[in-house]
Image: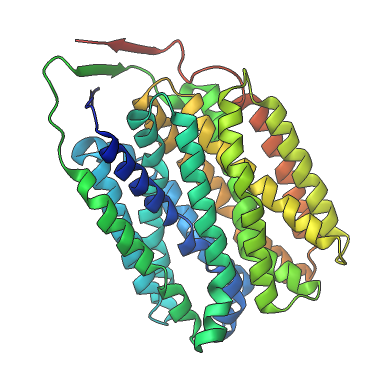
C-alpha cells in the first residue's frame, strides 16, 4: 500500500490559525461525554433507566471509538485528514442535537452519532500534529491535550448550574455543547483547502507489516484502554460516589470539574517532560502510585481529606491521558505510523474502556456499595501500570518491519 505525504511551507499566520483550529477541535472531544456524568441521576430518574443502562451513556461513545477508529485513517487518506475531521465535528454537533430531544431512543442514537464524530478527531489529531509540527510534536500534544482537559472540566462543572440558573431540563444543558461544535466547524473549515505541492516534494511510504504483530503497539493500546477505562468510569460515577459521601448533586458536579482542572497542569507538563526522557517508566510508575493512593482514600471515607483524594485523581487522569497521547507520537517514526498506531490503540483501547462504566454501574446495582467498584478500579490501575512499562520503552512500533522509499 502506498501513501503520499504532502509537504508545504506555511506562513506564521497560517500556523497560528491551524493551532487555533486544533485547539477548538480538541475543545469538542470531551464535553459531549463529560457533561453527562453530573446529569446521570436526572436522566435516570426522568427516563426510568437502571444504573447499568445509565452507565451505557458513557459506554456508547467508547464503542463508537472502538468501531470507527481503524477506519478513520483510511477515510483520511481518501478525502484528506482535514476534511475528515471537519465531518467529524459536524457529527458531534448533530449527535448532541439529536440526543437532546428528550426520548430514550434519540438519547442513545444521538450519543452514538456524537461518539462517531469524536472518534474521528481522537484518531486523526495525533497524525495532524506529527505532520504539521514535526519538530514540536510533544509540545503541540501538550497544547491540545490541555485544551481537551479544559473543555471536559468546564462541561462537568456547569451542567447542573445551567439547569439551576436558567430553569432548564437536562436536555437543554446537554444541547449547550452543540454551539461549541458549530464554532469549531467554522474555524476548521478553511483547513480543507488543497495545498499546492511543489514537484519533487512527494514522499512515498510503503508498509509491509501489520501493527497487530507489534508487541509495543499492543502495550500502547492496553495503556490507552486501561487509563481510558478509569477515566470514563470516574466521569460517569464519581459524582455518585461523592453524593454517597454527603455532597449535594450540584457540588458533586463541581467536584468532577475540580478533578479535571486539577489534571490540567499534568496534561501540559507530561508530554513535554516525556519527550525529553530516554524512557517514560518513571512517569508510568508515578501515575499508577497516585491512582492507588487516591482510590484508597475514596474507599475509606469522606471528611476533609476527600478533597485531597479528588485532586490526586485529577492529577492522575490528566497525566494518564496526555501520556497515552504522547506514546502515539513518540512510538511512531512518521505521520502514517502515528495515524495507524492511533487507530489501533484507540480501537482496541476503547473496546476495553467501553466495559468500564456499565460494569461499575452493574456492580453498584448488585452490591449497593462502592466498595467493589473502587476495588475494581484499583486492579485496573495496576494492570495499566504494567502495560505502561512496556509502552514506555524507547522504541518505534515495527522498527524492523517498515520499508520507506523516497522518489
Question: How many labels sit on residues?
Answer: 0
Residue closest to the far bottom = 167
Color theme of the render: rainbow
Percent across and percent down for residue 304 are 86, 65
Residue at horizontal 72 percent and vertical 79 percent from the top: 248
- Front in this rendered view, residue 31 or 91: 31
Judging depth in this view, the residue of 221 and 394 nearest the camera is: 394
Q: Position of residue 26 (x, y in %)?
A: 43, 50
Is 150 situated above or below 39?
above
Q: Position of residue 372 (x, y in %)?
A: 79, 59
Residue in view at x 30 percent, y 45 percent: 17
Name the image quarter holding residue 286: top right
x and y, in percent, of residue 239 in the image: 68, 69
Q: Is residue 267 left or right of residue 113?
A: right
Figure check: 59 above or below 138: below
The residue shown at (35%, 73%) is 98
Q: Is residue 272 left or right of residue 67?
A: right
Q: Is residue 121 in view from this perspective?
A: yes
Q: Nearer the viewer, residue 369 or 144?
A: 144
Figure check: 41 above or below 280: below
Q: Quadrant of the N terminus?
A: top left
Residue 340 located left or right of residue 12:
right
Amino acid at each position: 500500500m502506498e501513501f503520499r505525504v504532502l509537504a508545504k511551507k506555511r506562513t506564521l499566520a497560517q500556523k497560528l490559525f491551524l493551532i487555533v483550529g486544533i485547539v477548538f477541535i480538541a475543545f469538542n472531544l470531551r464535553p459531549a461525554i463529560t457533561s453527562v456524568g453530573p446529569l446521570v441521576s436526572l436522566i435516570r430518574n426522568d427516563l426510568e433507566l437502571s444504573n447499568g443502562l445509565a452507565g451505557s451513556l458513557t459506554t456508547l461513545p467508547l464503542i463508537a471509538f472502538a468501531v470507527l477508529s481503524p477506519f478513520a485513517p483510511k477515510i483520511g487518506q481518501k478525502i484528506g485528514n482535514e476534511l475528515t475531521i471537519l465531518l467529524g465535528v459536524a457529527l458531534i454537533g448533530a449527535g448532541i442535537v439529536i440526543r437532546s430531544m428528550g426520548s430514550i431512543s434519540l438519547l442513545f442514537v444521538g450519543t452514538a452519532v456524537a461518539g462517531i464524530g469524536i472518534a474521528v478527531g481522537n484518531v486523526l489529531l495525533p497524525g495532524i500534529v506529527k505532520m504539521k509540527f514535526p519538530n514540536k510534536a510533544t509540545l503541540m500534544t501538550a497544547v491540545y491535550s490541555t485544551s481537551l482537559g479544559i473543555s471536559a472540566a468546564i462541561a462537568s462543572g456547569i451542567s447542573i448550574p445551567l439547569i439551576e440558573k436558567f430553569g432548564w431540563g437536562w436536555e437543554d444543558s446537554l444541547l449547550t455543547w452543540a454551539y461549541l461544535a458549530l464554532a469549531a466547524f467554522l474555524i476548521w473549515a478553511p483547513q480543507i483547502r488543497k495545498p499546492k505541492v511543489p514537484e519533487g516534494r512527494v514522499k512515498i511510504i510503503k508498509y509491509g507489516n501489520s501493527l497487530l504483530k507489534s508487541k509495543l503497539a499492543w502495550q500502547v493500546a492496553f495503556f490507552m484502554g486501561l487509563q481510558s477505562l478509569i477515566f470514563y468510569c470516574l466521569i460517569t460515577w464519581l459524582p455518585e460516589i461523592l453524593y454517597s459521601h454527603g455532597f449535594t448533586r450540584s457540588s458533586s458536579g463541581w467536584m468532577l470539574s475540580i478533578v479535571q482542572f486539577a489534571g490540567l497542569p499534568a496534561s501540559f507538563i507530561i508530554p513535554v517532560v516525556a519527550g525529553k526522557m530516554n524512557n517514560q517508566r518513571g512517569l508510568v510508575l508515578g501515575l499508577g502510585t497516585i491512582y492507588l493512593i487516591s482510590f484508597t482514600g475514596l474507599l475509606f471515607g469522606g471528611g476533609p481529606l476527600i478533597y485531597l483524594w479528588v485532586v490526586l485523581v485529577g492529577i492522575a487522569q490528566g497525566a494518564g491521558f496526555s501520556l497515552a497521547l504522547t506514546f502515539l507520537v513518540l512510538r511512531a517514526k512518521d505521520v502514517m505510523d502515528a495515524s495507524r498506531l492511533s487507530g489501533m490503540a484507540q480501537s482496541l483501547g476503547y473496546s476495553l474502556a467501553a466495559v468500564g462504566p456499565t460494569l461499575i454501574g452493574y456492580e453498584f446495582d448488585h452490591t449497593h456499595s462502592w466498595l467493589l467498584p473502587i476495588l475494581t478500579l484499583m486492579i485496573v490501575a495496576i494492570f495499566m501500570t504494567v502495560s505502561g512499562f512496556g509502552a514506555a520503552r524507547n522504541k518505534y512500533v515495527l522498527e524492523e518491519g517498515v520499508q520507506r522509499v523516497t522518489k
